[in-house]
Image (tube, grey):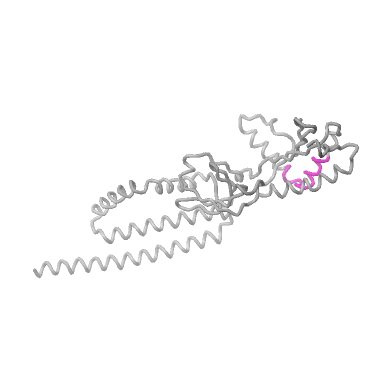
Amino acid sequence: MRLHVFDILGKYHNLVQRSFFAGFLIFVLLAVSKYIQAFIVKHNHAKAIAYNIIRLVRILAVFAIVMIVVAVLFENWYTAAVSLGLFSLILGFALQTPISSFIGWLYIIIRIPYKVGDRVQITGFKGDVVEIGYLDTTLWEFGGDYIANDLPSGRLIRFPNTLVLQSEVYNYSWRKFPYVWNEIPFHVAYESDFAFVESVLRQTTKDILGPDLEEKVKELKHMVHQTPVDEMTIRDYPFVTLRTNTNTWVEVCVNYLVDPKNAAAVRSEIIRKAIPLLLKEPARVMFPKANAR
């Protein structure tokens, strides 16, 4: 009986020692984790990359803490491994969707189909990425049911990360070339001077966007040159195309590269400046009659 009591006291003493040591390790681990996160925030100027690294550091810290707790509860590592394996098996069956979403988060961190700040579309969801959690992603929606333009709707969209493993991801903010082609149609009559209209629209667009994007077109051509795609398919920037309409006008479309988040503002500025210039030449630019529209 006395030996049994001493055995219990000895095991209790060992448990207390392991618990004290484990608490010390957890404290050190949390302190190191906080220091690493602060260091990343201070020295990494790319916010999206820092965001992903911090998330990874946090999940690794949590995993290490769980392992320390298991080591304290089970003195025998073999017993601990078997118990943890059985628990994980049961948990895996019960939480298949969250586990798939966590695997989707790992895919996002490694492959980077999108990052915080990118404008993306996945299935029917369109928006700017504001948060990438371990289980889901949050978008700040643009467009939507109440707005026809590509402006923020004010709604948040949250979807499970598992969607990136099942659906196409359209990224409008690709880090190698964060621009998209945009198009504005102007309706003019068949009798108009199309060469004049084309020159006005091209020059107005160039003045608003400035010379920087011309360099971006050169970069795009260089990138395409590295692929089997014919480089000549990329037109000079900006360019104008014409197409006829079933009514009594011709659509003169100006095409240009733009940051997708500034597309609405740039479109409005081009229209605001181009139309008065076209109206100054009524003999060369004839707009369709109001009753013919």
Residue ID at (85%, 42%)? 278
Q: Is residue 117 left or right of residue 6?
A: right
What are the residue bounds of the magenta stretch? 200-214
Quadrant of residue 238 within the rendered picture: top right
In this rendering, would 11 be left or right of 110?
Answer: left
Q: Quadrant of the C terminus?
A: top right
Is the residue 228 above or below the residue 31 in the image?
above
Q: Residue at x 86, y 43 (%)?
A: 279
- Pinpoint residue 134: horizontal percent, then vertical percent: 45, 52
Expressed as whole percent of the image width and height from the top left, the position of residue 1 reads 8, 68
Give 161 or 212, whichever is nearer the viewer. 161
- Whether the magenta-drawn stretch holds residue 206 is answered as yes
146 vs 209, left or right, is: left
For the point 55% across and 51% down, the residue is 139
Q: Is residue 260 above or below residue 231?
A: below
Q: Is residue 285 magenta?
A: no
